[in-house]
């Protein structure tokens, strides 16, 4: 009884869970199809959770894929296709946000952070080394003598293992 | 029906155990409060008796949370649907592994797991023998505060033992996407990593309170922090990899990392933790960078808490996120703000006074590790920016944007690529003052070979892409450069092989750990670059007997039948994979599973492991072939070198474990000097 119910439920579920989206029909021109696929990876399915239309099984994604293919077949450039999608769905549709006033921080932030962290750490190290006087010429030459001996240049770990 | 339910287990015993769990959780909260009070008082009065009491309270709190978590698992195992959490996430038909795993599949119960790890690690910290009195008492008090905050959150807002009256006859089951072996073990490992950083956090706070400009303090502190950082990092590495592997074969999208906000949430603590590991080496060996290491220790757990907030607050939508109401999210944000805010304020106040020892020239091991930290921190900040920016922009201007893989490919990837270029030089540089020319000579062979690897990669894969070939060279550079360092240490080819072997045996485990972790990273880079750059996808609607070709493989659909699983029904496609130039064909199955309990459908990917490559087959809906015959849509990916993506991090984690076992970390500073 339970099993029959399960099968019946599943049969209904498998067929009617979602009307199957129209199957993807690749473009006949393989160069155009390759361009379409490259675009799919960068365009977000607008009803999904962080999924590209290349990945999403949703009907909406299938519609968007068809739209992209149609536009490419009509001879439009990648940029024009993107612009068209943005006009329809907003910037949200692009996984690569446009560079404009509102996204400067997003795009140039990483570089700024890299420079800031580097400057901060450099200052920390500099301040520290200013506190100790530089080696005198005499000390420098003694150091050079010590370093000239191969054994003294080795890593302390390696040394520990040697003895 | 009622009789059948009663038949599963005597209700009274069940009720007692659930109530015991509920009580134990509240008791644990009380004990944590006691832990904070006793540790703080013990610290201020310098009383070993009070501090000993705090240790007892910490251990008792851990035991109580363990009892609570055990009771929760019990409720799931016996399917006690009078507990609302069980009713919402379990089902009598579910296999036992997923009944148990459901105990960390929801917000409420996974929070108990979080508290369990927090208190168990807190108890381990309280039992630590080598720590000086003041530092230990302060750390135990801090860990106790974290315990109080999270246990109070669990008890007052997310009680996992909340009852339903009347109890439903059947549960709503766990999201079938989560019913998967990799995902059953993914959260516990992830939490061991996330929450392990809490001990680093507590030790950092304690060091800020106790720390002084003392030459011997910071190396010792570095040695106490490192094992915790290493263990957390290794757990987190395995946890994240399991999650990526799950996404790879369970979602059926052919990819393994989507720069999904929740994936990023787990990646940020990992990046901060990796920076911490390296910075702590400098502090331990040379007493330098004390302030920076403390900062990173605070940062790593802050990112863990941020991750918990992002996943549980509902501000992000993701396949991995718990759907939870914003009110709890706000409370989590308050916990995050209070604990991290206080810690960073303490840092701002105290860190100018912190002074370690250790001068070093820019070109030195220390200098290389500082550079490593610059890049890792910038990369971590980039992930943070990419994850939070859409939220901030929407809140500030109402504009919605999406930040996805192309953004990270342009920002995160170049940062890491530069860091990887520098990486092999680091371990070869001497402490204090390195010899760049000497290092260059020692790496010349590895660099030459890496260029050959890049050229070979350029020739071997179609279509030819300069950037992917460069990536292959970079992966090769990491592996070869690391091996060059190993060869240098055992003086390979410069002394007799027997002597080299003796030296290899004599190398400390930590050195082997470094070699494995860096080489594992190279293995991962190779896999990630080749899979991303050269995977070939093909999709067609096939009638029985027809084939679809993807890269070097062709896949034939032989038939589809209905099979019955424990709690699902599936359409199972039988397919045959053959190499296009003719080798032994292999049969595999791919399924579409339907779970009646939740009404969901999932895909079960068919994977044919071919050496390092995967042939990845997804069975789709019924449809019509080009010729108009009835057929099934089949998507096939050829994922070259996909094996390395998951093998690399496993090697890295193994490296972390080896380093953890290093004798040096178990000895006190004084003892080590005596031993050497």
Image (cartoon, coloured by chain):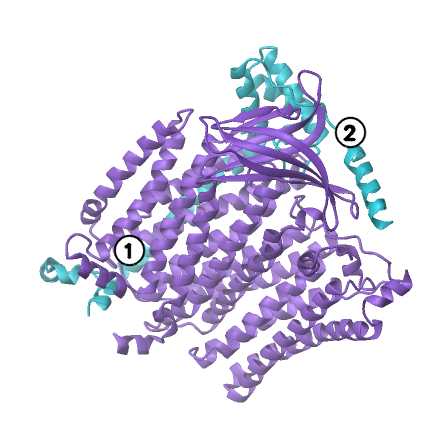
Tell me: B260 left or right of B280.
Answer: right
Tell me: B175 left or right of B553.
Answer: right
Q: Which chain is purple?
A: B
Q: Secondary structure at mark 2?
A: loop
Other-residue count near label 2 (Cα within 10 Å), few / some / many at <14 / 14–19 / ≥20: few
Query: In the rendered view of the protein, which quadrant contains the N terminus of chain B?
Result: bottom right
Q: Chain of mark 1?
A: B
Q: Tell me what hue chain A is rendered in.
A: cyan
The residue at the point 35 percent across, 39 percent down is: B474
Tell me: B476 left or right of B402.
Answer: left
Disc on res. A19: 2
Q: Chain of mark 2?
A: A
Query: Which circle, 2 or 1, is nearer the viewer?
Result: 2
Task: Kindly tell me whether residue B639 is visible in this rendering.
Answer: yes
Q: Is B41 above or below relative to A142?
A: below
The residue carrying mark 1 is: B365
Q: Secondary structure at mark 1?
A: helix
Q: CA distance from mark 2 to mark 1?
A: 61 Å
């Amino acid at each position: 009884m339970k099993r029959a119910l399960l099968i019946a439920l599943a049969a209904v579920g498998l067929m009617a869970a979602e009307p199957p989206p129209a199957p993807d029909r690749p473009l006949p021109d393989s160069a155009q199809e390759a361009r379409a696929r490259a675009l799919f990876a960068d365009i977000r399915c607008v009803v999904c959770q962080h999924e590209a239309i290349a990945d999403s099984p949703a009907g909406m994604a299938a519609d968007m894929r068809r739209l992209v293919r149609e536009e490419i077949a009509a001879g439009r450039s990648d940029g024009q296709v993107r612009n068209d999608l943005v006009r329809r769905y907003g910037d949200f549709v692009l996984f690569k946000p446009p560079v404009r006033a509102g996204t400067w921080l997003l795009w140039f932030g990483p570089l700024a952070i890299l420079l800031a962290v580097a400057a901060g750490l450099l200052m920390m190290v500099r301040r520290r080394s200013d506190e100790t006087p530089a080696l005198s010429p005499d000390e420098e030459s003694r150091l050079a003598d010590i370093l000239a001996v191969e054994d003294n240049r080795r890593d302390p770990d390696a040394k520990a293992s040697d003895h | 029906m009622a009789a059948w339910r009663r038949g599963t287990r005597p209700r009274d015993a069940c009720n007692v155990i659930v109530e015991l769990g509920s009580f134990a959780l509240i008791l644990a909260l009380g004990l944590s409060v006691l832990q904070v009070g006793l540790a703080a008082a013990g610290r201020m009065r310098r009383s070993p008796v009070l501090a000993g009491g705090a240790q007892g309270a910490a251990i008792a709190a851990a035991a109580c949370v363990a009892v609570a978590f055990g009771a929760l698992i019990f409720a799931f195992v016996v399917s006690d649907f009078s507990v609302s959490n069980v009713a919402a996430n379990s089902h009598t038909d579910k296999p036992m592994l997923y009944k148990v795993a459901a105990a960390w599949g929801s917000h409420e119960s996974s929070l108990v797991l979080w508290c369990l790890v927090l208190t168990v690690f807190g108890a381990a910290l309280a039992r630590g023998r080598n720590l000086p009195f003041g530092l230990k008492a302060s750390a135990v008090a801090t860990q106790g505060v974290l315990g109080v905050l999270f246990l109070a959150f669990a008890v007052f807002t997310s009680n996992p033992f909340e009852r339903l009256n009347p109890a439903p006859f059947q549960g709503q089951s766990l999201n079938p996407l989560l019913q998967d072996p990799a995902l059953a073990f993914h959260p516990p490992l992830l939490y061991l990593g996330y929450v392990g950083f809490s001990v680093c956090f507590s030790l950092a706070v304690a060091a800020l309170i106790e720390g002084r400009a003392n030459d011997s303090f910071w190396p010792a502190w570095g040695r106490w922090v490192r094992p915790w950082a290493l263990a957390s990092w290794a757990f987190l590495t395995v946890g994240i990899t399991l999650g990526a592997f799950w996404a790879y074969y369970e979602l059926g999208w052919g990819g393994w990392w989507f720069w999904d906000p929740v994936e990023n949430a787990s990646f940020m603590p990992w990046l901060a933790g990796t920076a911490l590991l390296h910075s702590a080496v400098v502090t331990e060996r040379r007493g330098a960078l004390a302030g920076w290491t403390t900062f990173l220790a605070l940062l790593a757990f802050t990112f863990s808490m941020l991750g918990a907030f992002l996943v549980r607050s509902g501000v992000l939508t993701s396949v991995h996120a718990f759907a939870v109401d914003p009110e709890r999210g706000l409370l989590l944000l308050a916990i995050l703000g209070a604990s991290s805010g206080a810690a960073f304020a303490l840092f701002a106040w105290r860190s100018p006074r912190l002074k370690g020892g250790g001068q070093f020239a820019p070109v030195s091991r220390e200098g290389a590790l500082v550079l490593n930290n610059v890049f890792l921190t910038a990369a971590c900040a980039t992930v943070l920016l990419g994850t939070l920016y859409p939220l901030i922009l929407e809140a500030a201007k109402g504009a919605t944007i999406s930040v996805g893989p192309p953004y990270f490919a342009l920002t995160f990837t170049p940062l890491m690529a530069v860091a990887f270029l520098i990486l092999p030089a680091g371990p070869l540089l001497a402490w204090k003052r390195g010899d760049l020319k000497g290092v260059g000579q020692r790496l010349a062979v590895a660099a030459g070979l890496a260029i050959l690897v890049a050229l070979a990669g350029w020739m071997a894969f179609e279509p030819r892409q300069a950037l992917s070939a460069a990536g292959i060279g970079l992966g090769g550079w990491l592996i070869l450069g690391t091996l060059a360092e190993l060869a240098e240490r055992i003086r390979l080819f410069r002394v007799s092989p027997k002597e080299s072997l003796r030296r290899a045996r004599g190398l400390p485990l930590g050195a082997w750990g470094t070699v494995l972790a860096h080489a594992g990273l190279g293995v991962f880079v190779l896999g990630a670059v080749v899979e991303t750059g050269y995977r070939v996808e093909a999709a067609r609607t096939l009638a029985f007997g027809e084939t679809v070709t993807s890269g070097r493989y062709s896949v034939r659909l032989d038939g589809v039948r209905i099979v019955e699983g424990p709690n699902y029904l599936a359409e199972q496609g039988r397919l045959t994979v053959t190499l296009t130039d003719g080798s032994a064909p292999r049969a595999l199955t791919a399924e579409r599973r339907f779970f009646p309990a939740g009404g969901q459908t999932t895909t079960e990917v068919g994977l044919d492991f071919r050496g390092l490559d995967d042939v990845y087959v997804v069975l789709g809906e019924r449809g019509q072939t080009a010729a108009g015959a009835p057929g099934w849509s089949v998507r096939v990916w050829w994922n070259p070198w996909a094996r390395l993506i998951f093998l690399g991090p496993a090697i890295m984690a193994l490296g972390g474990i080896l380093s953890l076992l290093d004798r040096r970390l178990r000895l006190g500073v004084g003892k080590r000097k005596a031993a050497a």
